[in-house]
Structure formats: C-alpha cells, structure tokens
C-alpha cells in the first residue's frame, strides 16, 4: 500500500472501511475493488444515474454535465453525486446511498414452482442426485432433485451478483470485453454464488454434494458463456445473433471442484438455440408443452432480454427483444427485484389506491408487476396520458409511498417501461406477421420469466404488455425454465423433445429490422395492442 496515496473512506450500514485511491481510477471502480457495489444499470457510463453516493466534500469536486442531467438541484445540494463520474485525487469520504441489494439465498416457495409433474419424467438411473440451475440476468434459481424418484428435494433463489457489472446482458458483455481479468471476475462471482447456494441446499436437505452426479444449467446465452469463460465476445457481433454459440466449459472439472460435487459429476450447459435465444426459452417450451397446444399459442419469457416463441401448428417462430431490465425492477429510479419490501400490487381504493408489499414489509421500492399496476392506475385515473406524459399536477412525478423510503415514479421511469413493453409488443406483432397470423388468431399466451405469478393480466393488457386475449387464455408460469431444466435432468423423453424443438424452430433477428422498428414505435403508446391483419405470407425459411 502506498502510504502517501489519498484514502477513500466508505460509510455503510456496518460501519466504515478505507480503500487506497489509485491514480485515474473512478470512484465506482474503487468501490468495486473494495467489495462495495452500488446500483448501476449502465455499467458506469453515466446514462442510468443510479450509482448515487453522498460525498462529504462534494462542494470541492466540480459537477459534471452528466451529473447535472441525471441529478436534481436538491440532490446536488445534498452532496449526492454519481460514483462513475468522480475520480478522487484527495482524501474523500462517501456514504453509500443506493448499494446493490445483498440478498441471502432463500428457499423457493411452493407457489413459485411451475406446475409440472416431475415424477412422470423419472427413469432408472445410476445417479441418484442431480442439480438444476436457471441462470437469469437478475435472479439465479437452483434445485436439488432425487432423479430416481422424480422429486424435488430443495430449492434456492438469489440475486445474480453480476448486477454490479451492469443490470443488462449487453453492459456485462461490454465490461467483460475490457480485459480477460474483468471477464474472469464476472464469471467468478457467479461461480461463487452458486457454490454458496449449493452449500445451503446440502445442509438443509442433509445431502452430501459429493453424491451429486449430474448438473444441468439453462439460461440466456450471455450468462452461460460468461460462466463458461468462453465465446462471450461473439455476442457483441450482430452477425452471430442467430447462430448457435458454444457455451460448454472446456474444463468442467474446475466447476466440480468449486462446487464440491462427485469427482465424475456430469455438468452440462444446455446449448442455447442461437445468439440471444437462450436455453432457458427451450426449457420453458419443454415444461409448458407449447407445441401440444393449439395453433396460435404464444410463450413470452419476460426478462432483461425477453424471448418469444409462437407456435403455428407446425413450426415455432422464435425471436428475442432487448427491452431492458424494467420488468425485473432495474433501471427504475425506485425499482427493485421482486423480494421482500417490493410493491408488487397497486389496486383501486375509492378515488385513491392501496399498495400490497411482498413480505408485508415496509415498502422499499417497486418491482415489475407493481410498476405495471401503477402505470395502469395512472392511466385510468387521468394522471398519465397514452404518450407517457404526466398531467400538470403530477409533472414532477407521482408519489407512491412517503415513509422511511420516498418512492415516486418519474417521467424517466415511465419511458423505461414504455420501451420495455414496446419491445414485447413489437416483437409479438412481428412474429405474428412472419407466421401469417393476426393478433386476433392468438389462442393462448404463456407468460413466464420476470413476473412469475404476480402479474395482473388485465393491467398488462391495458398498457399493451400482453396481447388482446381473454384472461382465461393467459397462463402465468413461475419458473418454467427451471422446471424444464429439471425435466431434462430426469428424462430421455424431455431430451428428445428438446432436440425436436431445435429442429422445428425458425430463429429471427430483430436487430436493425425496419419493420420491427416501426412496430416498436407504434407500441410505445400506453394502450392495448392494436389488432391488424398480416400483410404477407408466413416465412418458413
């Protein structure tokens, strides 16, 4: 340690810590190097305005143009600054305002599992215990299964610790592209998090991890490739966005050792369908049996990178659309994941509204389903127009809760949701056109992914997040990808189904598609999806 180096003093909930400053290093990077992660959707380029810290000597540090754009005058007067904009050159003292939520692993509740009968998948096997892992951009979900009996023994869910490198996959991929060391760290924090979850599961289920002989992982291509430590740079090249990317680690022995599994445990990263179409979508299709449903059945896997699959009776039309992390509570000024303290429901109560909070706790923020409800309520009550503008009385934002935590929706939050839901609406309409189907021909919609079972279908339809089908035709499937992963662990039939799905899928890339761009713009309006007839015959490749 250089004794003459300026010192960064970090005040946090547990006390204080000191980190030596390094020449030219941003405050955001210094905090990361000291083990402190602040919220940041953009990975440190200043565009999200989330990495807020309170600086004791803020007046002595010039305010950047980015900070003037992202912070209010009142915040600046209070010493609030953006960590990605500051480069300490003298002793500096900061207080973390918005640290990344650190959540201990918790058990998956029964209502969080997809309703599939795993016992039907069980087959004779020499391997008794297996582990299924669904790698999401925001959440990780893991279960331990008895493969001989076809039963789930225990499950855990937790936040993906890679969030400190960006809330969306592209930001993380760009961070990893900076150097092999950063890429190694991004994969390493995920590897360590899985090890911690497995240790908890082992203890709660009284199963020695050395008896686990089979592991299957599904996820979006970016998460799989970052954990595998290979080929993630390919995803930054648009020409690869419909190609199959090899995500299987070159040496799974490293993971076996890190996770304490049987010495000969088989670890399989289920191959993605192509580019940004991950194996989590394939696993969800296996679990929901979409291709056994009527023509016009649609599956939407909501997430930071949302994936969609439309079944026309003989072929699957598949695409993905990067709408951003709003559905998972990121990129929103008052957003948070769907965990205890999150406002998940907003209901009409006389002329006002009533909030419901996960865990019946004091509100800490708004998760994706709560955001959808809030916007629908604002529309119904004339507080917001379909363009996304607040009425004059709410021009500075709309307060949802005033207490220990000030929770308010700002104009920028509405814009983030509009873009996310336009990516979905535009993608659904585009797929329908490729299949030669009008929106009115949709028969069933499976809503999987970020919202779980919390989404209010009527409100989602009102703002144009779901197609105009009856409430009874919408099926909310919690953790369908995890269930499909469990089925792949247990069943040769599920494996055959997976390969059949690969063969009947037609993958489309929406990037720079002029027709999709037009549909995206049309779907920015906060209104139900507009039914229109397709203007061309289906594209069957």
Image (cartoon, grey):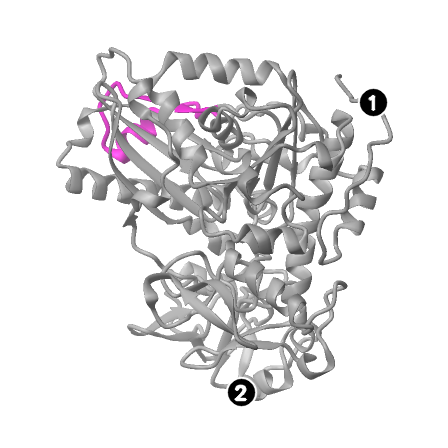
- For this rendering, which residue is in front, 18 or 277? 277
Residue lying at the far right of the rendered structure: 535
> Quarter of the image holding residue 244?
top right
Residue 177 percent coordinates (x, y): 59, 42
Which residue corresponds to the image point at 60% horizontal and 70% vertical from the top-left? 85
Name above or below for residue 314 compared with residue 321. Answer: above
Residues rendered magenta in the picture: 248-270
Say which quadrant the C terminus sits in: top right
Q: Is residue 376 left or right of residue 15?
A: right
Foreground mark, 2 or 1? Answer: 1
Say which quadrant the N terminus sits in: bottom left
> Quarter of the image holding residue 339?
bottom left
Question: Across the whole image, how many numbered discs are drawn on residues?
Answer: 2
**Residue marked by disc 1:** 537
Question: Is 322 a magenta residue?
Answer: no
Which residue corresponds to the image point at 68% horizontal and 57% vertical from the top-left? 418
Which residue corresponds to the image point at 25% horizontal and 21% vertical from the top-left? 147
- For this rendering, which residue is in front, 294 or 212? 294
Question: For the residue labelled by badge 2, is the local secondary structure a helix, a strand or a loop?
Answer: loop
Q: Is residue 60 visible?
A: no
Mark drawn on residue 78: 2
Q: CA distance from mark 2 to mark 1?
A: 59 Å
Name above or below for residue 458 compared with residue 24. Answer: above
Name which of mark 2 and mark 1 comes first in the sequence.
2
- For this rendering, which residue is in front, 13 or 454? 454
Question: Is 265 a magenta residue?
Answer: yes
Residue 337 percent coordinates (x, y): 45, 57
Q: Is residue 161 visible?
A: yes
């Amino acid at each position: 340690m250089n004794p003459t180096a300026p010192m960064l003093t970090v005040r946090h909930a547990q006390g204080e810590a000191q980190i030596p400053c390094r020449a030219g290093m941003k405050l955001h990077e210094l905090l990361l190097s000291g083990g402190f992660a602040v919220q940041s959707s953009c990975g440190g380029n200043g565009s999200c305005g989330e990495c807020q810290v309170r600086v004791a000597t803020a007046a002595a540090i010039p305010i950047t143009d980015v900070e003037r754009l992202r912070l209010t005058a009142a915040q600046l007067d209070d010493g609030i600054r953006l960590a990605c904009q500051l480069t300490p050159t003298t002793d500096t003292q900061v207080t973390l305002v918005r640290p990344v939520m650190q959540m201990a692993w918790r058990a998956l509740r029964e209502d969080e599992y997809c309703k599939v009968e795993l016992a039907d998948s069980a087959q004779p096997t020499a391997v008794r215990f297996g582990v299924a892992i669904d790698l999401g951009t925001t959440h990780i979900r893991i279960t331990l299964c008895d493969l001989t009996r076809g039963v789930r023994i225990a499950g855990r869910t937790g936040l993906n610790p890679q969030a400190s490198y960006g809330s969306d996959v592209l930001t993380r991929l760009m961070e990893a592209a900076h150097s092999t060391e950063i890429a190694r760290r991004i994969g390493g924090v995920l590897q360590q998090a899985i090890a911690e979850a497995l240790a908890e599961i082992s203890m709660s289920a009284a199963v020695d991890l050395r008896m686990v002989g089979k592991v299957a992982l599904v996820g979006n291509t970016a998460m799989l490739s970052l954990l595998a430590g290979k080929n993630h740079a390919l995803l930054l090249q648009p020409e690869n966005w419909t190609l199959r990317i090899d995500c299987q680690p070159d040496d799974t022995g490293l993971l076996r050792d890190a996770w304490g599994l049987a010495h000969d445990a088989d670890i399989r990263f289920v191959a993605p369908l192509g580019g940004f179409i991950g194996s989590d979508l394939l696993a969800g299709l296996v679990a929901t049996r979409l291709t056994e449903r009527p023509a016009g059945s649609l599956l939407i896997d909501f997430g930071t990178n949302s994936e969609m699959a439309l079944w026309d009776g003989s072929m699957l039309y598949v695409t993905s659309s990067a709408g951003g992390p709003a559905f998972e509570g990121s990129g929103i000024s008052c957003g948070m994941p769907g965990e205890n303290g999150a406002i998940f429901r907003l209901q009409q109560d006389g002329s006002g509204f009533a909030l419901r909070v996960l865990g019946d706790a004091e509100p800490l923020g708004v998760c994706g389903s709560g955001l959808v409800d809030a916007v629908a309520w604002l529309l119904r009550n004339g507080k917001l127009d379909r363009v996304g503008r607040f009425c004059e009385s709410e021009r500075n934002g709309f307060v949802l809760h005033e207490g220990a935590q000030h929770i308010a929706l700002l104009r920028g939050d509405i814009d983030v949701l509009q873009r996310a839901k336009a990516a979905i609406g535009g993608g659904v309409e585009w797929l329908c056109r490729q299949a030669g189907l009008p929106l009115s021909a949709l028969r069933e919609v499976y809503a999987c992914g970020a919202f779980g079972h919390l989404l209010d279908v009527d409100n989602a339809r009102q703002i144009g997040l779901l197609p105009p089908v009856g409430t009874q035709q919408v099926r909310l499937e919690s953790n369908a990808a995890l269930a499909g992963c469990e089925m792949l662990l247990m069943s040769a039939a599920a494996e055959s189904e997976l390969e059949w799905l690969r063969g009947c899928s037609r993958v489309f890339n929406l990037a720079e598609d002029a027709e999709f761009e037009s549909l995206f713009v049309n779907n920015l309006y906060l209104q139900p999806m507009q039914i229109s007839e397709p203007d061309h015959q289906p594209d069957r490749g």
